[in-house]
Amino acid sequence: MKNKLFGLIYMSSYKIQLNIVNLRELTVIEKIDSPSFGQADSKNEVWENDMSKICQAIDGFKEKMAEYQIDNFKFYANQQLIDDLSASYIADQIRVRTGLQVEWLSGSQIVYAKVLSGIKSFTKVQRGKSHPVSVYLLSLGSAMINLSYFENQKFVSTWSLPLGPREIQEINEITNSTPNNPIDVIKDYIGAKIDHLAWQLNPNPNAAIIIQHADSVNNRYLRQNDTVTRISANEFSDFYQDTIKMPQSYMMQKYQLEPAVAEHTLPNLIAIRQFINLLTPDAIYITDMSVITGLLMQEAKGILNKAVYSNDIILTFAKNMANHYLIDRRHAKAVTKFALHIFDRLRRIHRLNEKDRQLLILAATVDDVGSFINQASRYEQSAEILEANKLIGLSDQENEIVKEICRYQTMDGGPGKPDIGGHHYRNLDSHIQLKVAKLVAILRMATALDASHKQKIKQIVVSLKEDKHLIIRAKTNADITLERWSFNKHTKLFEEVFGIKVSLKQEGMNR
C-alpha cells in the first residue's frame, strides 16, 4: 500500500481537503474535508483569519497519511484571490506550525488543471457514441468562469470571465440599491460579460457541454459514486427556476453548500443558463471532476496512458494567441526550430533544463504578437499582451520569464527601450535574471537566421570548437546577406552571456 497510494492536499478559498489516491487507477480511496473557512472582507484576509483551523486540519491530515503509510504527497493552494505578499506570509505560517510547504497555484495553472479534468470526463461523455463528440467545458470557480472547447478529445481553446468576490460584491451593491427584480439585474450583469466572449465563439449544435464545479446542481443530480451524469435541458430549467427563488439560507441547507459556494450559486446558475442559450449544445452533462482531478492527472502522468497527454495544451494555447494576433506562422516555426537546435546542442554550456526549453518554445511562438498593435515597439507590446493574457499551465514566475524573453528581443536603442542589464532588467527577480538573459541570447540568434521571413535557411549545423568558438553553418544556396547582417548584430548578447565567440558560415545545399 505504501508504494501505491498518494496524498494530495488542496486548499481552496473556503476549505482544505485531503485526498488519498491510487494514482495507477486514479481512484480516490478516502477524502477528508476541513470545516469551512470564514469569508474574508478583503483579499488580504483570505485564510489569515482561519490559520488555526487550517493548521489543525493539516495535523489531522498528517495523522491520516501516517495511517496509510504515505510519504509521497503534495500540498497545493489556490492563489487566485491573494497577492504574493499574503501568499508568502500564509505559507510561512503553515510551514512554521505544521512543517509542510505550500505550492501556490496561479490562475493559469488552475485553468490548466480544469482542462485536464475535462479530458478525463470525455470517456463518460463519449460512451456509446460512434464518433468523437465536440465538447464545451464550462468550469465555475471562486474567481473565474472558464469555458474551454475540445474537438476529437483534444484541447482547442479556452476563454475566461471574472466572477470572484469583487464581482459578487458589485452585484450585491447593485441589487441592494434597486427596487427591481434582483435576478434581472444579475442577468444583465452576467450577460454583459458573456457578450464580450460571444463574438469569439462559434456555436456547435452537435457539441455537448460539461458543467464543472456547480455544487448545487451536482448535489441535486449526481448519484453517489458517479463522476459524470447527463441531465436534460428541462431538468436544468426546472432546477434553475426552483433555485433562483430560494433564500440563500434555505439553499445552503437543501443542497449542503458552504457559505462561499452559496454566495456564487445564483450568479453561476444564471451564467450556466446564458452559456447554454448561447452555445445551444446537443447534450448537457454535470461532473464533480475538479481542479483536484487535474492535479492528480499531472501527478500520475508517468504511469497513466500517455495518450491522455499527447496533445500539448499549453503550446496549443500559445499558438491560438499567436494566430489571434496574426503572426507570421512560417517565421515562428523556423525560429522555433533554430532556437531548439541551438539549445539542444549547447546543453553543457547553458545548463538549462527541460522546463526552460519549453519556455523557449513558448516565447518563440508568441514573441511577435505585439506587431499586431505597433510594429515599431512590437516586443514591448508583446510583453504587455502577455502580462494581460497569461499562458495557461504556467506559474506566475514562468509566465514572467516568457514575457521578459519577448520583451528583450528588441535590439532598438534609445531612451526607455528595454536592455539586458538596464533598469527594468535589474528589477527582475534575481532568481530569473540569468535564465532570461540566456534564453533571450539564444532566441535572438534564432530570430536573426530568418530575418527576411522567407525561410532561406533550411537547416543549421551547430559546432563548438575547443577554443570556445561557436560556429553555426547555414545550409542554403540563397542570398542570406540580410540574415548575416542581422546575425552579427544579434550575437553580441550571446557572446557576453556565455563568453563564446560566434560565427555564421554558409554552406550550399549540395555539400
Image (cartoon, helix red, strand yellow):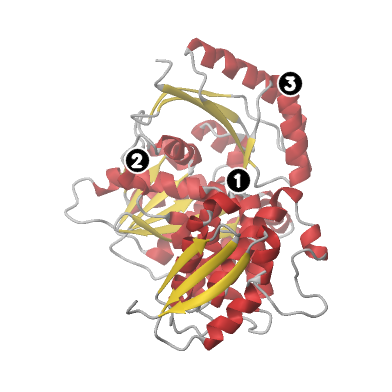
Q: CA distance from mark 2 to mark 1?
A: 21 Å
Residue 111 x, y percent position in the rendering = 52, 50
Crowding near the residue tagged with mark 1, few <14, some 14–19, many ≥20 C-alpha atoms within 10 Å? some
Q: CA distance from mark 1 to mark 3?
A: 27 Å
The image shows residue 314, relative to residue 116, as above or below, that is below
Mark 2 or mark 3, earlier in chain? 3
245 or 119: which is nearer to us?
119
Residue 280 x, y percent position in the rendering = 36, 64
According to the image, label 1 marks what residue?
A: 142
State which quarter of the image contains the C terminus.
bottom left
404 or 350: which is nearer to us?
350
According to the image, label 3 marks what residue?
A: 97
| Comparing labels 2 and 3, the label whose residue is closer to the camera | 3
| Image quadrant assignment for residue 30 | top left
Residue 478 x, y percent position in the rendering = 42, 87
According to the image, label 2 marks what residue?
A: 228
User: Under tag 2, what secondary structure?
Assistant: strand
Q: Amino acid at mark 1?
A: Ser
